[in-house]
Amino acid sequence: MKLPVSTEWLLHCATTLAQLEPGATASAAQLAQYYDLPAPYLAKQLQSLVKAGLLAASTGPRGGFRLARPASEITLLQIVEAVDGASSPYECREIRQQGRGAFPAEECRRPCLIARKMAAAHEAWRSSLAGVSIGDLLAELPASAPARTRRRLTGTA
C-alpha cells in the first residue's frame, strides 16, 4: 500500500499543532517553512483536515490552524482517511474465473481467498491506526519537544 506524500505531511502537521499552547494557531506558511514544504499545496491539504473536523481554521493576521478537538480524540486513521479515503487498496477482479484456469461458478460463490486475506490485512491496518491518537504520539515525544517545536515554528529559536 502506498499513501500520498501529503498523508505524511498532515500527520506531522497535526502532531505539531498539538504541541502548541491551548488556543494558539499556526499558519500554513509557518508549517510549510517548518517542514520545507510547498505552502500553497500544504494549505490545500490542511483544508481536508478542516473538512473532516480534525482541524479548525481561522482567518486574519493571527489566523491559522489548530486542532479542532483534543489530541487524544484524533486518531491516525482519521487523518489518513481524511486525505486518502477509507476504501481498501486491494480490489479483487475475480481473475480466478477467467482464462484456462477458471474455477467453475459454483466454486466462486464466496469471495476469493486472496480477497478475504487482503481485506483482513486492511482491517488490521485500520485497527492499528485507529488505536493511536495524536495524544499518544505526544506522550512518546521527548519532554523538551513541544517547547522546541513552538520556538522553531514561530521563528523565535
Image (cartoon, rainbow, N blue to C red):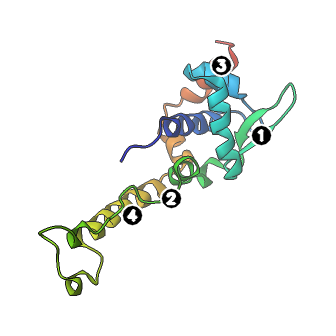
Q: Please state the horizontal and vertical placement of residue 88, each as a whole percent of the image.
A: 42, 59
Structural crowding at the residue carrying mark 2, measured as other residues with C-alpha within 10 Å and reported as few (<14), some (14–19) or many (≥20): few
Give the number of the disc on residue 86: 2
Label 2, label 1: how far apart the Cα atoms are: 24 Å
Observer-side mark, 4 or 3, equals: 4
Residue 150: tell me if it is visible.
no
Tell me the amino acid under the disc marked 2: Ala
In which quarter of the view is residue 147 placed?
Answer: top right
Residues at circles 4 and 1 in contact by the CB criterion of under 8 Å: no
Q: Please state the horizontal and vertical placement of residue 136, each as a whole percent of the image.
A: 51, 47
Label 2, label 4: how far apart the Cα atoms are: 10 Å
**Would you name the residue on which mark 3 appears?**
151
Q: Residue furthest front?
A: 99
Residue at the location (69% across, 23% down)? 29
Give SS at disc 3: helix
Give SS at disc 4: helix
